[in-house]
Structure formats: C-alpha cells, structure tokens
Image: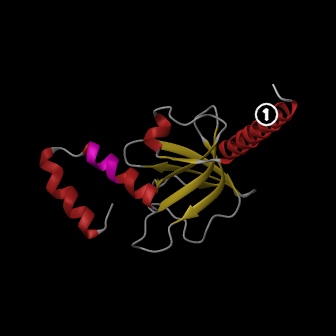
Amino acid sequence: MNPRRRQRLIIIVVLVALAGIAIGLTLYSLRANMNLFYSPTRISAGEASVGRSLRAGGVVRDDSVQRDQQTLDVTFTVTDFEEDVPVHYRGILPDLFREGQGVVIVGTLDERGWIEASEVLAKHDENYMPPEVDGALKAAEARRATPSDTAAVAERRTSGTP
C-alpha cells in the first residue's frame, strides 16, 4: 500500500474512533441525568429502578400529609387512585401544595419503596394538570371502570373533577 494512502487511512480511523468515543460519552452522560416519569402504579409494579432519578406524579392522598414540627421534614402519599407511593421531602413545600391536589415529585426511589424527593411541584390552577399525571390518572380510572361506570367516568372527565 502506498505510504500516503496508509497515512490517510490511519487518520480516518483515528477520527472515526474519536467521534465514537465522543458520542458514547455524550450518551452515557445523558443517560445518567435522565429522569423518567412514573405513575404510582408503575412504581408499585417494580418498573422504576431503585436509586435512579425519576419523576412521579399523582394526587396527594387526603389525610396523608405529616409534618415534623422540629424540622422541615414532610411525608405524604401520592396516589393515582389505584396504587399509593409514600414520599419523604425535606424542605419548604410550594404554596399550592395541599391534599387532594396534583403534584409531580422529582427524586429517587429507595429500597423501602419510598420516594426521597428533591423537588415537589404543585399544579398552579384549578384547570391545569401536568400531562403525565393526567394521563396516568385517566389510565388508572379506565382500568377501574366497569361498563356500567362508563357514563359516570365520562361525566366526571367533562366536569373536570378527578
């Protein structure tokens, strides 16, 4: 082989290898920072990985919020009306956070099945529900509905009540 062709081939191979390494590192970095959305039903089914960053959403179950009077620790339960997931959060909750309202939790799942929240986001008005939470709640409602309940479910959806 001609020395000039050999040199070009080596340069091309090195550039392709460097590009592959750069793409691989970028994908690895994005994978490590990705937080996927899970409903309480999917978390209870074991679809969420322990220790990985995730987003979970649903409605704060009534009478589930417990505040520690000495610290900023708060525990509460998030539900999609099919399954429940307990949440622990240390910090100041949003002003709109309350029982019976939609929330999105950013955090990690621990071995006990609890979410250690790093951020709690509350819905901002009476009509808005985050799309992921709304979809998860509607899917859970559809699974619970029987043929005789179909009219009642359709009526609740149009009136805006969960």
Choose between 120 and 1: the one closer to the eye. 1
Of 58 and 17, nearer the camera is 17
What range is drawn magenta here?
138-143
Question: Going by the picture, which residue comes out furthest to the front?
Answer: 2
Residue 74 position, x and y percent, is: 64, 54
Check disc 1 and report its element: helix, strand or loop.
Answer: helix
Q: Amino acid at mark 1?
A: Leu
Q: Main secondary structure of the magenta part?
A: helix
Q: Quadrant of residue 114?
A: top right
Residue 81 position within the rendered picture, expressed as x and y whole percent measured from the top left: 37, 48
Above or below for 92 versus 133: below
Which residue corresponds to the image point at 44% horizontal and 56% vertical from the top-left?
A: 133
Q: Count the marks: how many?
A: 1
Question: Which one is nearer the viewer's eye here, 70 or 85?
Answer: 85
* Quadrant the C terminus occupies: bottom left
The image shows residue 57 at horizontal and vertical percentages of 50, 53
Counting from the top left corner in percent of width and height, residue 79 is at 44, 49
In the rendered image, the residue lying farthest to the top is 1
Would residue 32 appear left or right of 1 to someone viewing this image?
Answer: left
Q: Give above or below for 40 relative to 17.
A: below
The residue positioned 31% from the left and 68% from the top of the image is 160
Q: Residues within 10 Å of mark 1 (few under 14, many from 20)?
A: few
- Is 42 on the left or on the right of 12, as rendered? left
Q: Along the horizontal axis of the image, is 101 left or right of 117?
A: left
**What colouring style does the render use?**
secondary structure
Whether residue 66 is in magenta: the answer is no
Residue carrying label 1: 9
Q: Residue at x 46, y 74 (%)?
A: 125
Image quarter where the N terminus lies is top right
Can you say whether 12 is above or below 151 in the image? Answer: above
